[in-house]
């Protein structure tokens, strides 16, 4: 599984993902910080990477359809972001990535749940 971390994630998260056995690039290391959401989305599609982000704009499945991607994982915080909450959510996602493939789907991860949007279930294909 190839992932791309948006600019809101720290380097320590990258190392944790690598330690869990996944390949990961970051928006920051690729000098894409400050790029538009469309550019980040297109880069992920071209590189066949699943995007991990805090940016709720990526939950707009009309604007950013996960259908043609390796997946989009959005971390959604209802209130203040803390290290403890982020760690809990990241562990949850990493465990799911070991058994489930986000390809073509949007995962919205919260502290106590994950919602999965699969366009194949909503459209006649």
Image (cartoon, rainbow, N blue to C red):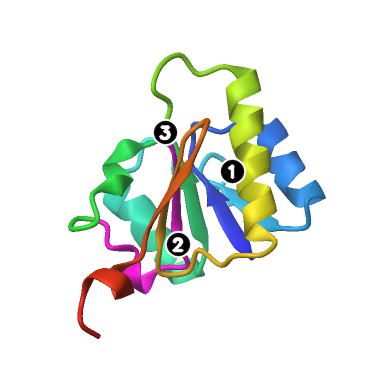
Q: Quadrant of the C terminus?
A: bottom left
Q: Examine the structure image and report whether residue 68 is included in the region drawn in magenta.
A: yes
Question: To which quarter of the image does residue 55 belong?
Answer: top left
Q: Quadrant of the N terminus?
A: bottom right
Residue 121 is at least partly visible in this image: yes
Q: Closer to the observer: label 3 or label 2?
A: 3
For image coordinates 34% across by 42% down, the residue present is 35
Vertically, is 41 above or below 27? below
Q: Position of residue 47 (x, y in %)?
A: 50, 67
Q: Position of residue 108 (x, y in %)?
A: 41, 45
Looking at the image, tell me whether mark 3 or mark 2 is earlier in sequence order.
Answer: 2
Q: Which residue is mark 2?
A: 71
Magenta segment range? Answer: 64-75
Q: Which residue is mark 1?
A: 29
Q: Position of residue 9 (x, y in %)?
A: 56, 33
Residue 19's disc is: none
> How far is disc 1 from disc 2 in space, using C-alphas?
21 Å
Q: Position of residue 60 (x, y in %)?
A: 23, 49
Secondary structure, mark 2, is loop
> How far is disc 1 from disc 3 in space, using C-alphas?
23 Å
> How far is disc 3 from disc 2 in space, using C-alphas?
16 Å
Vertically, is 65 above or below 83? below
Looking at the image, tell me whether mark 1 or mark 2 is earlier in sequence order.
Answer: 1
Secondary structure, mark 3, is loop
119 or 32: which is nearer to us? 119
Judge left or right: residue 115 versus residue 100.
left
Q: Which residue is mark 3?
A: 76
């Amino acid at each position: 599984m190839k992932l791309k971390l948006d600019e809101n994630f720290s380097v320590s998260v990258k190392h944790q993902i690598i330690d869990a056995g996944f390949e990961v690039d970051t928006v920051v290391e690729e000098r894409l910080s400050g790029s538009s959401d469309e550019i980040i989305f297109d880069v992920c599609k071209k590189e066949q990477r699943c995007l991990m982000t805090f940016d709720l704009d990526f939950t707009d499945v009309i604007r950013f359809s996960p259908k043609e991607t390796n997946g989009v994982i959005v971390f959604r915080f209802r209130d203040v972001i803390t290290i403890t909450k982020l760690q809990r959510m990241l562990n949850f996602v990493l465990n799911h990535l070991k058994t489930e493939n986000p390809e073509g789907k949007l995962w919205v991860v919260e502290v106590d749940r994950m919602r999965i949007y699969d366009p194949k279930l909503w459209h006649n294909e």
